[in-house]
Amino acid sequence: NGGVTDTKNLRVKLVLLGDSGVGKSCIVLRFVRGQFDPTSKVTVGASFLSQTIALQDSTTVKFEIWDTAGQERYAALAPLYYRGAAVAVVVYDITNPESFAKAQYWVKELQKHGSPDIVMALVGNKADLHEKREVQFQDGIDYAEKNGMFFIETSAKTADNINQLFEEIAKRLPRPSP
Ligand code: GDP
Ligand code: MG
């Protein structure tokens, strides 16, 4: 499951949820490979990637990242995907208010059916497109605070806040007792 191995080396299942096209796959590729491919079309095909980060206290966290192959279009399949996840990253596009509404739907879904101790992050992606912004930073942070989530705005294109997103999640993971 999304469990842990020992006190110094954590291994966690992380899933991304959110509308198709908000940049979930690009966030993962930026984090894991340091790349952004502007010509990539909406993702097809499942993918599984992992990336390990080290924290200041010498803990390592191995993220096992499940990226959807468009299952976000089929709400009925979602529980299979987020089952056992220790972390859910719910993504919207700051230029697209519908994607923000959909993110709120996913948060409610996870509250109802996700693991009770799941760590949830709300991510406003495409922050580089500030001239097209339609979802205000304050609206994102207000919603996240009400729901006990960590909030951040990112850009997979410029890499802004991508590593910070995963570092902040790592810091919030429940630690096993020694
Ligand atoms: P997914 O369906 O949520 O996995 O979305 P993708 O990762 O496939 O990205 C969808 C589209 O958004 C692609 O054309 C990306 O190039 C674009 N995109 C993703 N992230 C960003 C970003 O941070 N800024 C900008 N400007 N475009 C992005
Ligand atoms: Mg994708």
Image: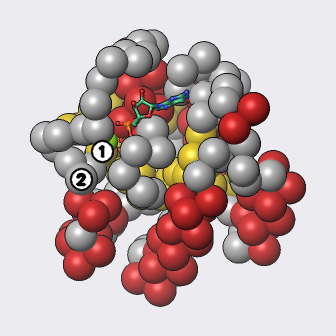
CB contact under 8 Å: marks 2 and 1 = no
Q: Which of the labelled discs sits on residue 70, or is there none?
A: 2
Disc 2/disc 1 C-alpha distance (Å): 9 Å
The answer to whether residue 108 is seen in the rendering is yes
Disc 1 designates what residue? Answer: 67
Q: Residue at x 24, y 70 (%)?
A: 74
Drawn side of residue 36 relative to residue 148, left or right: left
Q: Residue at x 29, y 38 (%)?
A: 42
Tell whether circle 2 marks a residue whose Cβ is less than 8 angstroms from ligand 2. yes
Closer to the camera in the image, 122 or 10 = 122
Q: Is residue 72 above or below residue 173?
A: below
| Image quadrant where one finds the N terminus | bottom left
List the single residue furthest toward the bottom. Answer: 112
Crowdedness of circle 1 by 10 Å Cα count: few (<14), some, many (20+)? many
Question: Residue 106: x percent and y percent?
Answer: 48, 71
Q: Residue at x 38, y 25 (%)?
A: 29
Q: Quadrant of ligand 2?
A: top left
